[in-house]
Amino acid sequence: MGRLTRLVPFIAVGLISAAAGWFVTIERIPYLMTDAVFARMEAAGARPNVLGKAVMRYAKGNIVPMANADILARSAILDLSEGPLQFTATPPRELVDYWSVSVFAHNTDTLFVRNDSQVPEGKTITVRLRLAHHARPGPGVHDVVLPSPRGFLLVRPTMPDRENPAAVAALADALAEHRLERIGAQP
Amino acid sequence: MRKRGIWLAGLLATALAGATVGVGTAWLVTGQVDARAGRGPNPWKTMAGTGSAAADRLQRAIVARVGIWALPDSEVIYFNTESDSNGDPLRAGCTYRLEARAEPAARWWSIGVYRNYFWIDNAIDRYSLTSSTIRRLPEGGYTVTVSGTPTQGNWLPLGEREGRITLLVRLYQPDPAIMANPESVPLPTVRRQACR
């Protein structure tokens, strides 16, 4: 009985430490994975606040787990520490079966998503990406407030057929019109 | 005094060991897409709340590990399986026949195959088939051959290297009723035909 009593603090400390390790890891994983993928993207040439080009991606060089092979993605690592950004695009509805723009927080929370069917045909969607202390945008602009400077913007246009180079090239040309720009300097 | 020091050192070692077990278990569990129970027609399953900021912490960690930047159910529903319709794990050395008699109610859908959650390198750079590219049967529905050996028709290259094989169906702009009854979605059966 005495020996068992002496073991109680060890069992309690072991269980509490295991639980703490579990919960801290679960909480931190979304941040860690975001940073890990950002590091791989930057190693492959991506730069913060620059919308990457719409290029076909292949297994060699695939850096995002469970990526969709049928979207001609454009994406940007966001860093709002130097001020807000604004994304503008006209969804190329005639060239895609689906198009959307989504914004994710550093912890992978989905902050915003709009697809082409939610944008009037031929119209432009404008999305302001800002921190809480940055100025609000005017009417007609979607307002996305990130909880911290780091985040991710992802445009997902489906390719009609990734094995049809002409169709993919036409879609890439249309996507080249998408813009991500800094709005003034409001650190 | 010395006895007390040994006791404290033992307590510290226990705390470190406990924390290591907690961290390691969390890392192992979140590295598997099938770590949590889901719902769907055999053998497929989907986890409600995927891609949502409202999902619990464990689910968000799993999605961050094996499907980062997933979209919420209202936009995309993801069904995955790592086993065939008999419950046996998918293997790179085998050939599988996927057979569906109907298509899911969604604006656009795709079926992809992954090894260790990444695309499988192959000679024709094909990693998925979509509602835009798949060849349908005259009577409706479709079949897909998932194999390391090229085949005519709807072929999804499986490669030769072993690893964790995952099939993933994406339903873009799905019928909102799907999440209430995901078992009713007409997804293909997955039958093993032959193995090396």
Image (spheres, rainbow, N blue to C red):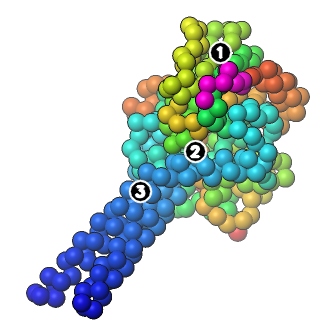
State the residue in front, B3 or B16: B3
Residues in magenta? A180-187
Q: Position of residue B27 (x, y in %)?
A: 49, 61
Q: Which residue is mark 3?
A: A24
Indicate the quadrant containing the C terminus of chain B: top left, top right, bottom left or bottom right. Answer: bottom right
Give, as a three-letter code, the residue at label 3.
Val
Instruction: Tell me: B6 left or right of B116.
Output: left
Report how many numbered discs are placed on residues in the image.
Answer: 3
Q: Position of residue A114 (x, y in %)?
A: 58, 22
Quarter residue A51 falls in:
top right
Q: Which residue is mark 1?
A: A125
Label 2 and label 1: CA atoms lie apart by 24 Å
Q: Residues within 10 Å of mark 3 (few under 14, many from 20)?
A: some
Q: Residues within 10 Å of mark 1 (few under 14, many from 20)?
A: many
Q: Residue furthest toward the right?
A: A166
Q: Residue at x 38, y 56 (%)?
A: A23
Q: Residue at x 16, y 88 (%)?
A: A3
Q: Residue furthest toward the bottom?
A: B2
